[in-house]
Amino acid sequence: MVLRPRNGETRMKTCSVDGCSGQHLARGFCKPHYERFRRHGDPLGGRVTPGKPMAFLEKAARSSTDDCIPWPFSVDGGGYGKITVDSRLVGAPSETLRRAGQAQPSPSHLAAHAPGICHNPACINPRHLRWATPAENMADRMIDGTSNHGERHGNSILTDHQVAVIKRDIRHPSEIANDLGVSEATIRDVLAGRTWKHVN
């Protein structure tokens, strides 16, 4: 936005936050303050005092509560906490386990929420976490029903029930495919056990 004073000179409108001379972008704020306002509802929101995330994590690692301890700071796309340790961005659940005295068994192990106890990705309570291989973590997700296999998968066009019926159907795959409006290849993959292995 350009303001035009009466003397004919032009000047750019600046951010309305006290002490900020940044160029106005929207709602009276410069770009950084507008982004904070958009994310947090406050142009000064989202600022974290240095050391506060680590202090929170250390306290969580020593906690004796059985309740979830949600990570209130930066998270990744899946909702899992992130923290900077020795100039590296690492997972807050993994770092909590380390600080709680649970060494990572191997580089392939990751921090996983224990099945049947916690489904909150933001939780960093070490009592809710354990080290698991990717295969063990996937098995946990199947136990908890949080896996995106089968009809839970976003691209699924069949249901578990339909697949169970397909596996018992004695007709030619092309006939089954025509009835369900899917490709014959989809039916053949089901019958050969290449897909939908979890449905008997």
Image (cartoon, rainbow, N blue to C red):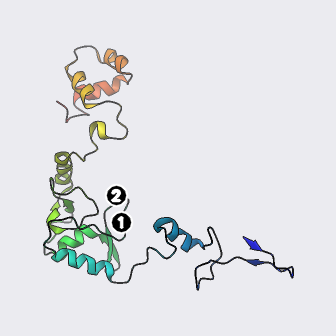
The residue type indicated by label 2 comes to Gly
Furthest-bottom residue in view? 19
> 104 or 33, which is in the foreground?
33
- At 34% from the left and 17% from the top, the residue drawn is 174
Q: Position of residue 56 (x, y in %)?
A: 27, 77
Does 19 sit left or right of 138 as displayed? right
Question: Could you tell me if the residues under marks 1 and 2 are in contact, i.e. CB atoms within 8 Å?
Answer: yes
Residue 4 lies in what quarter of the image?
bottom right
For the point 27% across and 41% down, the residue is: 149
Q: Is residue 171 above or below residue 195?
A: above
Q: Position of residue 16 (x, y in %)?
A: 62, 78
What is the x, y in percent for residue 183?
38, 24
- State whether residue 138 is above or below residue 27: above
Q: Which residue is mark 1?
A: 75
In this rendered view, identify the residue nearer to me: 129 or 135.
Answer: 129
Q: Examine the rendered structure and indicate whether residue 152 appears above or below residue 200.
A: below
- Image position, residue 164 (x, y; %): 21, 26
Quadrant housing the C terminus: top left
Q: Looking at the image, which is closer to me, 175 or 2?
A: 2
Helix, strand or loop at disc 1?
A: loop
Indicate which disc residue 128 carries.
none
Q: CA distance from mark 1 to mark 2?
A: 8 Å
Which residue occupies the foreground of this view, 75 or 41?
41
Classify mark 2: helix, strand or loop: loop
Q: Residues within 10 Å of mark 2 (few under 14, many from 20)?
A: few
Kindly indicate the quadrant of the structure image that contains residue 13.
bottom right
Mark 2 lies on residue: 78
Name of the residue lying farthest toward the right = 7
For the N terminus, which image quadrant? bottom right
Q: Amino acid at mark 1?
A: Val
